[in-house]
Amino acid sequence: MNKKGWPKPQESFHRFDSFHFGNGQELEGLKLRYLTAGTGRTDGSGQIANAVLLLHTTTGSSDLWFRESLSQELFQPGQPLDADQYLLIAPDLIGFGGSSKPSDGLRASFPNYRYIDQVNVVHRLLAEALNVTHLKLVIGISMGGMLTWMWAGMYPDFMDAAVPISCQPGPMSGRNWIQRRISIEAIRNDPEWNNGNYETNPSRYVFTAPSSALFTRSVVRLQEQAPTREEADALYERLVDNARKGDANDRLYQLESSMDYDPTPYADSIQAPILAINFEDDELNPPELGVTEPVMESLENSRSALIPRGPESVGHLTGQIGKTWKPELEMFLETVGLESK
């Protein structure tokens, strides 16, 4: 039975006395916001045995997972990640949502976090705040997918399975990095940025912010949205206005955190079955680059799923539409024995 707006997640916060980053920096009182839904079930040793970790995108937060396009397709009764069967855990990563970030006050003095720090801080969160020492599944979209690849290699015995979505298991490069670099340089070269120590949010960089939409959205959907020059101008203005709502340092740190992403050194350590889901019209992670297949061939009980373009495809953002890839997830979970009972 479909229950619209369900499950309703519970919001919590965890503060670490101190967190050490991979570059040697340290932050006292690092805060992570996280959402949970469902009920944890313990095993004979008293440990949570049914936890699923949900990792969000570079433009979102944990709230992403509880939008209707995902939660109604995945977490409802009888769905593949039924909240009656699993404890769902969705953290806001460092620099995002309600977790610690530069705009909280440190500005450019905030530690320069990287993806390896995101993995390690959530690993600590699970153990310290939630009594979780093993996961049934790690699943992530875009940035969350890249982190899923790193999770599988950095903590290979911590999960039963992993599903990276809308990403590739190779180093940050090509179109993916260039579109990030454009945004990074626009912020750093904004005359109002003041090396990150501004009192008022810089106003110039936002005019280049819509360029990321050109790389992440389906060209077909963009044309449908803006079939005339006037409508294209209006869409551009909306994208600029949306960029104005964010903080420049927060966005800069988010983008730069990906610069050394490269899960290939960890590939030989992966033990959990992997389902890598990508999309034919994802121009940010174009399948013709052939990055995913060589890695998948080296992994046991794993496979890659490429979702064909269709009337509901929206490019890189298709990963946020659960019904487009839910059948692949259901088949995979059944194969590895994790389907909802």
Image (spheres, rainbow, N blue to C red):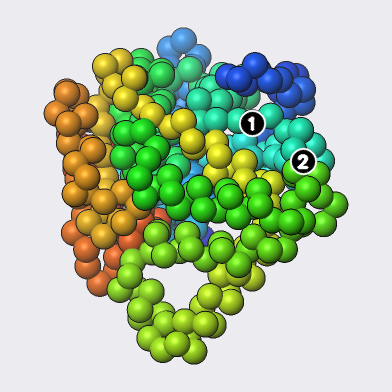
Above or below for 172 versus 61: above
Q: Residue at x 17, y 31 (%)?
A: 294
Residue 17: name its quadrant.
top right
**Residue reaching furthest top?**
45
Quarter of the figure that contains the C terminus? top left
Q: Give neighbour class at mark 2: few <14, some 14-19, many 20+ (Cα, 10 Å).
A: some
Between marks 2 and 1, how big is the CA–CA gap? 11 Å
Identity, as a three-letter code, of the amino acid under mark 1 = Asn
Q: Give neighbour class at mark 1: few <14, some 14-19, many 20+ (Cα, 10 Å).
A: some
Tag 1 or tag 2, which sits nearer the N-term? 2
Residue 38 position, x and y percent, is 50, 40
Identify the secondary structure beneath mark 2. helix
Above or below for 185 versus 204: above
Residue 72 position, x and y percent, is 41, 58
Nearest the camera: 136 or 341?
A: 136
Residue 137: in sight, yes or no? no
Q: Are marks 2 and 1 in contact (CB under 8 Å)?
A: no
Residue 185 falls left or right of residue 282 = right
Nearest the camera: 79 or 216?
A: 216
Nearest the camera: 67 or 221?
A: 221
Identity, as a three-letter code, of the amino acid under mark 2 = Arg
Residue 207 position, x and y percent, is 60, 67
Residue 281 falls left or right of residue 59 = left
Residue 236: in sight, yes or no? yes
Give the labeled residue for mark 1: 112
Give the labeled residue for mark 2: 107
Q: Residue at x 43, y 49 (%)?
A: 178
Residue 113 falls left or right of residue 216 = right
Count numbered badges in the picture: 2
Q: Residue at x 30, y 73 (%)?
A: 220
Residue 157: name its quadrant.
top left
